[in-house]
Image (cartoon, grey):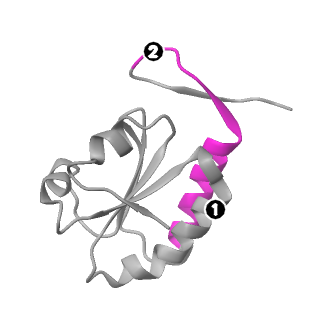
Amino acid sequence: MVLLVSERTFTQEVLESPVPVLVNFEAPWCGLCRIIHPLLLQFKSQCGEQIKLVGVNADENFKLSNTYRLKSLPTLLLVENGIIRHRLEGFRGRDDLRLALEEIKLTYTNCSKTYNHVQTADLECQSA
C-alpha cells in the first residue's frame, strides 16, 4: 500500500521524514503510472523501512506540481532531508524504471550516511 500525500501533508510526510522518501507524482488518467505501480510496490518491499514510498495525485495537488516543475507523469523524486537527491522522469517503461530503482536501492540500503554539512550529504559505503 502506498501512502497518499497532499499539499497539506507533504511537508510532514516527505520534507521532514527521518528516512529518504520516494515521491511518485501520478494521475488517474496516466497509463504509464498504472504500469509502474507494481514495480514501485516491489521496490518498497525490498527496501523495507529504509525508504518510504508515497504517492501524490498531480491533478489534485496543483501547487506541488508547479513547485516541482513536473513536465511529465509519472515523475519520481527521491527526497532526503528535504533535498531532492534523484529525479526520475521521461522513462520509457518498466526496464528504465527498474534500472533507476536498483541504483537508488543500492545507494540507500547498502551505505551509511555521513553528513558533513547541513546542505550536502556524503555517502560512504562501509565494507563489512
Q: Earlier in the sequence, mark 1 or mark 2?
A: 1
Numbered disc 1: secondary structure: helix
Residue type at the position of mark 1: Ser
| Residue shown at 13% from the left, 53% from the top | 63
The residue indicated by pointer 1 is 45
Across and down, in percent, residue 8 comes to: 21, 48
| Residue shown at 19% from the left, 52% from the top | 64
Residue type at the position of mark 2: His
Numbered disc 2: secondary structure: loop
Name the side, left or right, on which 9 lies relative to 108: left
Q: Main secondary structure of the magenta part?
A: helix
Which quadrant is the C terminus positioned in?
A: top right
Q: Residue 110 lies in magenta, yes or no? A: yes
Q: Quadrant of residue 111?
A: top right
Dot label at residue 19? none
The residue indicated by pointer 2 is 117
Q: Are marks 1 and 2 in contact (CB under 8 Å)?
A: no
Name the side, left or right, on which 85 lies relative to 60: right
| Residue shown at 27% from the left, 48% from the top | 9
Q: Residue 63 lies in magenta, yes or no? A: no
Across and down, in percent, residue 95 comes to: 56, 74
Q: Is residue 27 above or below residue 24?
A: below
| Residue shown at 38% from the left, 22% from the top | 119
Residue sitting nearer the eye, 78 or 47: 47
Across and down, in percent, residue 80 comes to: 44, 37
Magenta segment: 96-118
Across and down, in percent, residue 97 comes to: 51, 68
